[in-house]
Amino acid sequence: MKIKALFLAALATLALSGSAFADGDPAKGKRVFVKCKACHVLDKEKNKVGPHLVGIIGRPVASVEGFKYSKGADSMMAFAEGGKVWDEATLTEYLKKPKALVKKTKMAFPGIKQDEQIVDLIAYMKSVQ
């Protein structure tokens, strides 16, 4: 619980730290997306190993038709309960370390360590939408 509180405090500090990189750089984010594109498509509704990411910002979690999400306790389907939506804050937390947020996610990706890269990636994702 303490770790979660520390993470949320750090995330709030990051959000309030001004616009140094608050909006991100889509061109840099496109380069970061290279890590994602083996499993995800951003510009068309085509599922690969992972679900497509068309319209990801503002989309309900685990809502891509035809994709088989992880099920059971601590899964993506369980995480989606209650109407969670992929907003920038949730994506930021998930992209940092996916299995810390959704323990039994099928996504094997370990996460993106640098906060600026996550901000840039989200900026790129928004620019393609």
Image: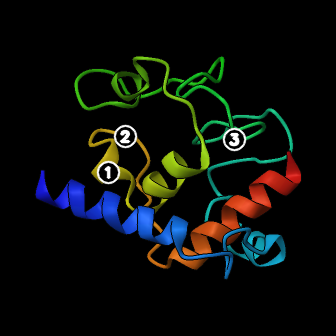
Residue identifier under label 2: 105
Asked whether the residues under the numbered discs 2 and 1 touch, taking CB atoms below 8 Å apart as contact, a structural biologist would say yes
In the image, is residue 117 above or below residue 3? Answer: below
Residue 96 pos. (x, y %): 43, 63
Nearer the camera: disc 3 or disc 1: 3
Asked whether the residues under the numbered discs 2 and 3 touch, taking CB atoms below 8 Å apart as contact, a structural biologist would say no
Residue 38 pos. (x, y %): 65, 58
Residue identifier under label 3: 57
Residue 83 pos. (x, y %): 49, 19
Res 74 seen here: yes
Q: Which residue is at 44% across, 24% downward? A: 80
Residue 53 pos. (x, y %): 71, 41
Q: Does dot 1 land on a helix, a strand or a loop? A: helix
Residues at marks 3 and 1, CA–CA distance in whole angstroms: 20 Å
Q: Amino acid at mark 3?
A: Ile
Label 3 crowd bin: few (<14), some (14–19), many (20+), radius 10 Å: some
**Disc number for residue 99:** 1
61 left or right, relative to 45: left
Closer to the camera in the image, 10 or 105: 10
